[in-house]
Image (tube, rainbow, N blue to C red):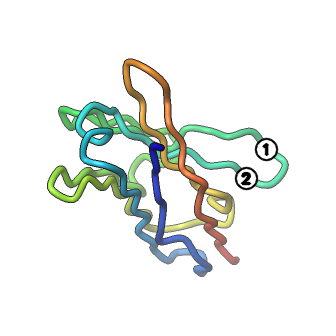
Amino acid sequence: QVQLVESGGGLVQAGGSLRLACATSRIIFSISNMGWYRQAPGKQRELVATIARGGSTNYADSAKGRFTISRDNAMNTVYLQMNSLKPEDTGVYYCNAVTVGPDYWGKGTLVTVSS
């Protein structure tokens, strides 16, 4: 069974920082484009950032300039460094792995930004 395990969420004040991590198996990590999505209360899940196997990145407009996605191929882990957090960044953050077959999702980690 494929597992994506997120960590690093928590409560932070506006303007603060958090770093999320998502670990998976070596096989899945090596064949996947990875991404972070979030779901705010009462809203649909939305893209935050993606990183391809080759390292190219893509960000939602709301994340540009504040968030950085990266991948550690040795650790089979993708990170999301979030700076200058805003209350509207509050939500459950999900890790996603896209392969030529099925997509995989983690269970999510909650980020709460207080004003």
- Give the labeled residue for mark 2: 40
Measuring from the top left, give residue 73's x and y in whole percent. Answer: 18, 50
Q: Dot 2 surroundings within 10 Å: few (below 14), some, or many (20 or more)?
A: some
Relative to 34, 12 lies left or right: right
- Give the labeled residue for mark 1: 43
Please determine whether, in this image, residue 25 is positioned above or below residue 31. below
For the image shown, how many numbered marks are present on the structure?
2
Amino acid found under the numbered disc labelled 2: Ala
Q: Are marks 1 and 2 in contact (CB under 8 Å)?
A: yes
Please determine whether, in this image, residue 100 is positioned above or below residue 66. above
Q: Residue at x 39, y 62 (%)?
A: 21
Measuring from the top left, give residue 51's x and y in whole percent. Answer: 32, 38
Q: Dot 1 surroundings within 10 Å: few (below 14), some, or many (20 or more)?
A: few
Q: Residue at x 37, y 18 (%)?
A: 100
Amino acid found under the numbered disc labelled 1: Lys
Please state which of residues 105 and 11 is positioned toward the viewer in this rendering: 105
Measuring from the top left, give residue 102's x and y in whole percent. Answer: 48, 24
